Image (cartoon, helix red, strand yellow):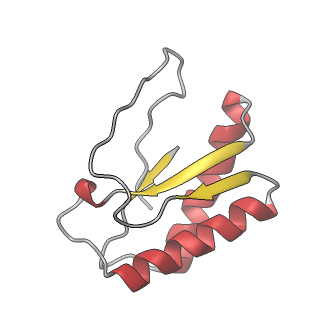
Amino acid sequence: MALVTVEKKDEPVLVARGLSEEAVKMCKEVGKEKIVIVPFAHLSNKIAGSEKGLNVFKLVEAKLKAKKLAVKRAHFGSNKSLLLDVFGHAGNVRFREF
């Protein structure tokens, strides 16, 4: 699962490239071929508008599918809380900023 926050200053193409490259790398490291990308506005107080955020999500989704990953994209407003069960391995939780 990738929790994604798109900020006002973000350049959609650059963010999508960096995020998708990192997601592919992480999937390979943990031996997974499925990923869920989730909008998570709680990570910033400089949130981009929904149109820009959706654009980034669509770009990321297309890039991940081109790499043969099974991708699900959660819709905006779909989560009000988040519960994570994190298993103890080196790649379980990472923070990246693009």
Tell me: 30 left or right of 39: right
Q: Residue at x 51, y 74 (%)?
A: 56
User: Residue pushed farthest top?
Assistant: 88
Q: Residue at x 50, y 59 (%)?
A: 74
Above or below for 51 versus 53:
below
Above or below for 53 versus 35:
below
Where is residue 30 shown, x and y percent of the image? 67, 29
Above or below for 44 versus 33:
below
Q: Quadrant of residue 71?
A: bottom right
Where is residue 27 shown, x and y percent of the image? 68, 39
Q: Quadrant of residue 73?
A: bottom right
Above or below for 65 versus 81:
below
Q: Quadrant of residue 89?
A: top right
Tell me: 78 left or right of 88: left
Where is residue 85 shown, x and y percent of the image? 42, 24
User: Residue pushed farthest bottom?
Assistant: 51
Tell me: 96 left or right of 16: left
**On the rendered image, what quadrant is the C terminus found in?**
bottom left
**Figure label count:** 0
Q: Residue at x 28, y 44 (%)?
A: 81
Q: Residue at x 37, y 69 (%)?
A: 6
Where is residue 15 shown, x and y percent of the image? 50, 69
